[in-house]
Image (cartoon, helix red, strand yellow):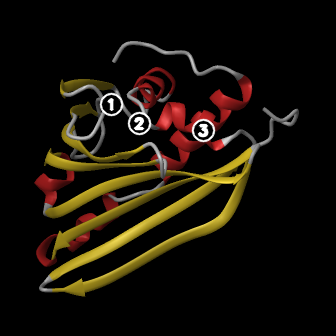
Amino acid sequence: MKGTHSIIKTSSKLTTFSLCQNNMFGTLSQEIEVPVAANEVWKIYGTIQLANIVVKHLPNIVHRVDILEGDGGVGSILKVTFPPGTPLLTSHKEKFVVVDDVKRVKIAQVVEGGLLDLGFTLYKVKFEVIEKDKDTCITKATIEYEVKEEAIANVSFVSIQPFVDIMNLVAKCVTHGTNSQSSA
């Protein structure tokens, strides 16, 4: 771990949209630089520990996470419950479709509830931990979604900010050694 504890946000935010077959497809992406080795940061992103940390430290984003199937690896299904008062969303079920410890990539796809109840046909989030050098990495969150034409107004519910908050939290945990675990 470097002596510095600063977290440097990069300015790369990517938003793309396209229309095809009466559906709108879009992506949102943001990344931050973390002054910690990629393998150390992946120890959180690559495990269920990420959900535990988010529930404990960001209850305004996620109220509860229940593991319905699996152990946090590919095929695991989680029920994510949002805080009371979250507009139009109470919970969703998501499935880990990729957990790649070599490439340090995790992709979760919503399979029931949440935005799927609001006209989305696809909603998935990808976290990547990219090695910059031996003591620094880039964490990147990307949202990919598809929404039916008649529900395009609901795209306003898609925001990268909760995932930026999660990345900043993990960066703080790994730079300050506060990645305490709690039960989901």
What is the quadrant of residue 148 in the picture? bottom left
Residue beneath disc 3: 39
Residue kind at label 2, given as amino acid type: Ile
What is the quadrant of residue 26 in the picture? bottom left
Residue beneath disc 1: 83
Task: Determine the residue positioned at 28% across, 65% down.
Answer: 145
Residue kind at label 1, given as amino acid type: Pro
- Compared with 67, 130 (above or below) is below
Q: Whole-Å distance between the Cαs marked 1 and 2?
A: 7 Å
Image mark for residue 15? none
Quadrant (top left, top right, bottom left, bottom right) of the N terminus: top right
Q: Are marks 1 and 2 in contact (CB under 8 Å)?
A: yes
Q: Whole-Å distance between the Cαs marked 3 and 2?
A: 26 Å
Please state the horizontal and vertical placement of residue 59, each as a whole percent of the image: 43, 27
Residue kind at label 3, given as amino acid type: Asn
Task: Determine the residue positioned at 24% across, 64% down.
Answer: 154
Task: Report the side of 147 relative to 139 (left or right).
Answer: left
Task: Determine the residue positioned at 50% across, 52% down.
Answer: 128
The mark nearer the N terminus, 3 or 2, is 3
Please state the horizontal and vertical placement of residue 152, each as a whole percent of the image: 22, 73
Task: Determine the residue positioned at 86% across, 36% down.
Answer: 4
Q: How many marks?
A: 3
Quadrant (top left, top right, bottom left, bottom right) of the C terminus: top left
Q: Nearer the viewer, residue 134 or 108?
A: 134
- Compared with 159, 66 (above or below) is above
Residue beneath disc 2: 61
Q: What element does badge 3 sit on?
A: helix
Q: Whole-Å distance between the Cαs marked 1 and 3?
A: 31 Å
